[in-house]
Image: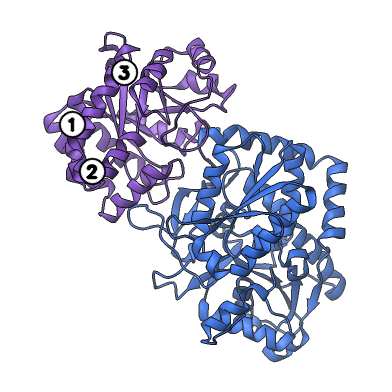
């Protein structure tokens, strides 16, 4: 077996021959860089000085008291520069891209968080930047489109297929296969062909590295559970990674169930998907009886993806992590709940994790604690939530 | 069936083959049946039948849109097999399938390749299954004597040797960066790539991506063993729909003449 980048049977490099040498070059560059003190110094300096790390681990007192169970901590990735965890990966990959002599970054984006983070880092490092975003999402997240343009990026509205994240990935991959010489594809999640799932996980694992240390300092013990939302799965793998060996820490990923896992309007891959090969990886995908990738739906543009990263599929298969569906309704309620209770407006993606925590908090005793990864801030979602609630907003 | 592919090259006086592509089910599967027979009669030496996929990431807009039309019209893998069964009543032209890994994986490798053998389909082309991943599919396809076609790209560099050494059927040399589709010119210097391949194998090499007129076909076939044309044919279907048959025949004839001049 020549296949690389496997997590059990999941992963691999199912990609056109045109891109294989790029992937091999990226892997070599990464393996060198991660052992290079100067690379790590630059990465850490940018993460700290520019992105604002380490992010806070905040004790949500009111929420904990209100729910009457576990002590709830929020890992505040929403406080990072650009407002989400995406910057962690973008800084890392942009530094790799520079190291490979690339001058241009391309990326897909769903909600716009990864696009904004990529455009930001491109501006910082003086790189050209082009973002692919489903047309549907450019409407749902119009403000983020302007934000990316403000940062100097060109935004391409993708009009094929369902015009959402999946199609944005398709077009970004196509663009990359047209132009590799000066271009790095800054993939935004722990998905795609090897080495992306590993590289993105490593850059995001700073979340759990910090959180583990922070919770030990604050509580003197490990959390009973770590909860994160999962689309492709980058914030979740980042939040889980350094707890994987701590067998008593439950790892819970919250998938977007959309209008429910028993409807077609869902994006819950673990709950409704089957094994397949797509976007460079063998993993679980929402697909129809003929193996066509299914149109998926979630109120959250960032979780509106028909697949899941291979390491999550693996953690699920061995029972190390558990994946639960959370509906639009539950996520919107949690969005409003956290806003009201703690004065923190979470991204609608992160609200999926908050929703599940609300459900299970009381199953824990008062001397147990749980960590919810607040992967991003919710400013971008306010208009959409208002629409969902039937409020007519005029900018 | 590898022999049948080789025969498709060697039967021509200059030992060059003209390979055509059509998306199955566009605009409907009965039309595809006719188009395949039209192409065989017009001189196509090998015909690639594309089984549509929802997300054809190696395709440019022309073939991508054909996939969308075919899926809208209700195409499935089994309907493609049924069409090939009908073709086999009339023609023994060399056939290949071109599709994406997920469709074959989902159908079941054994089940899929058993059907291929039964219907005398000689090979599969799977653009999202590179050398590193091919074993899971090729180990099954070979059991049923179906060749797994290897692709070599302008960016393959040293990989070309490794790929070529194991290649069966024919080698699909990708002319250009990017996705399928008509190009006004092919700028990649392909001769050195072909020369390297020739160092390690006598498996025929055909060039595809971006070829749309007889002059290009002649030029590409002259530096290799054949030319592959897809988008230019699918564009005719896009334009004329179910009435595309005569236009496809005429086009294939002129392209074949180009290849035979090589």
For label 1, the residue is B38
Question: Residue at (69%, 62%) from the top-left corner?
Answer: A240
Q: Which residue is mark 3?
A: B258
In the image, is residue A142 above or below residue B242? below
Q: Earlier in the sequence, mark 3 or mark 1?
A: 1
Say which quarter of the image contains residue B58. Answer: top left
Mark 1 element type? helix
Give me the C-alpha separation between circle 3 and circle 2: 24 Å
Name the image quarter holding residue A2. top right
Question: The chain shown in blue is which?
Answer: A
Judging from the image, mark 3 belongs to the subunit labelled B
The residue pinned by badge 2 equals B240
Q: Position of residue B15 (x, y in %)?
A: 31, 11
Q: Earlier in the sequence, mark 1 or mark 2?
A: 1
Category of crowding for the residue at label 1, using alpha-carbon neighbours closer than 10 angstroms: few (below 14), some (14–19), many (at least 20) = many
Label 2 SS: helix
Query: Residue placed at 79% from the left, 60% from the top?
Result: A209
Q: Give how far apart the Cα atoms at labels 1 and 2 are.
A: 15 Å
Q: Position of residue A77 (x, y in %)?
A: 74, 68
| Chain letter, purple | B
Helix, strand or loop for disc 3: helix
Contact, CB < 8 Å: mark 3 with mark 2?
no
Chain letter, disc 2 residue: B
Residue A369 vs A193, above or below: the answer is below
* A57 sits left or right of B181 in the view: right
> Label 1 lies in what chain?
B
Q: How far from the left and from the top, in percent, is residue A68?
A: 69, 89
Q: Is residue A204 in view from this perspective?
A: no
N-terminal label among 3 and 2? 2
Viewer-nearest of labels 1 and 2?
2
């Amino acid at each position: 077996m020549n296949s690389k980048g496997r997590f059990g049977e999941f992963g691999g490099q199912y990609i056109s021959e045109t891109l294989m040498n790029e992937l091999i070059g990226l892997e070599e560059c990464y393996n060198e860089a991660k052992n290079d003190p100067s690379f790590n110094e630059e990465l850490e300096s940018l993460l700290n000085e520019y992105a604002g790390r380490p992010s806070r681990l905040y004790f949500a007192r009111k929420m904990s008291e209100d729910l009457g169970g576990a002590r709830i901590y929020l890992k505040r990735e929403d406080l990072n520069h650009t407002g989400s965890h995406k910057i962690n990966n973008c800084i890392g990959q942009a530094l790799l891209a520079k190291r490979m002599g690339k001058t241009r970054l391309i990326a897909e984006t769903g909600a716009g968080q990864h696009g904004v983070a990529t455009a930001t880092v491109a501006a910082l490092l003086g790189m050209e930047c082009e973002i692919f975003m489903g047309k549907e999402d450019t409407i749902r997240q119009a403000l983020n489109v302007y934000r990316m343009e403000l940062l100097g990026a060109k935004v391409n509205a993708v009009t094929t297929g369902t015009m959402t994240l999946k199609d944005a990935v398709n077009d970004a991959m196509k663009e990359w296969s047209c132009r590799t010489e000066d271009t790095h594809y800054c993939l935004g999640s722990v998905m795609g062909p090897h080495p992306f799932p590993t590289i993105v996980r490593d850059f995001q694992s700073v979340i759990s590295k910090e959180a583990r240390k922070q919770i030990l300092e604050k509580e003197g013990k490990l959390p009973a559970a770590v909860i994160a939302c999962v689309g492709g799965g980058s914030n979740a793998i980042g939040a889980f990674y350094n707890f994987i060996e701590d067998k008593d820490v439950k790892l819970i990923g919250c998938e977007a169930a959309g209008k429910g896992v028993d409807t077609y309007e869902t994006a819950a891959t673990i709950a409704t998907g089957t094994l397949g090969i797509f976007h460079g990886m063998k993993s679980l995908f929402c697909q129809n009886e003929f193996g066509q990738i299914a149109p998926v739906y979630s109120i959250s543009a960032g979780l509106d993806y028909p697949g899941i990263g291979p390491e999550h599929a693996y953690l699920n298969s061995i029972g190390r992590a558990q994946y639960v569906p959370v509906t639009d309704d539950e996520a919107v309620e949690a969005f409003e709940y956290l806003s009201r209770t703690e004065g923190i407006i979470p991204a609608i993606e992160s609200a999926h994790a908050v929703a599940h925590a609300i459900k299970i908090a009381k199953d824990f005793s008062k001397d147990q604690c749980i960590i919810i990864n607040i992967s991003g801030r919710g400013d971008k979602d306010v208009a959409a939530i208002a629409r969902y609630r039937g409020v007519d907003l005029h900018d | 069936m590898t022999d049948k592919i080789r025969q498709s090259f060697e039967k021509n006086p200059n030992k060059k083959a003209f390979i055509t592509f059509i998306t199955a089910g566009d605009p409907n599967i009965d039309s595809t049946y006719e188009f395949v027979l039209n192409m065989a009669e017009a001189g196509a030496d090998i015909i690639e039948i594309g089984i549509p996929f929802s997300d054809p990431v190696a395709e440019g807009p022309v073939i991508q849109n054909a996939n969308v039309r075919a899926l809208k019209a209700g195409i499935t893998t089994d309907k493609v097999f049924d069409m090939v069964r009908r073709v086999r009543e009339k023609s023994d032209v060399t056939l290949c399938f071109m599709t994406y890994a997920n469709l074959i994986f989902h159908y079941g490798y054994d089940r899929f390749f058993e059907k291929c053998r039964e219907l005398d389909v000689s090979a599969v082309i799977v653009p999202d299954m590179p050398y590193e991943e091919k074993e899971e599919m090729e180990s099954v396809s070979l059991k049923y004597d179906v060749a797994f076609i290897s692709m070599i790209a302008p960016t393959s560099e040293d990989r070309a040797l490794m790929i070529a050494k194991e290649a069966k059927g024919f080698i699909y040399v990708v002319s250009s960066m990017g996705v399928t589709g008509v190009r006004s010119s092919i700028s990649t210097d392909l001769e050195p790539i072909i020369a390297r391949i020739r160092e390690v194998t006598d498996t025929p090499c055909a060039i595809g991506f971006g070829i749309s007129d007889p002059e290009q076909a002649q030029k590409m076939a002259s530096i290799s063993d054949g030319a592959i044309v897809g988008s230019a044919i699918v564009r005719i279907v896009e334009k004329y729909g179910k009435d595309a048959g005569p236009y496809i025949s005429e086009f294939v004839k002129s392209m074949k003449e180009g290849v035979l001049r090589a």
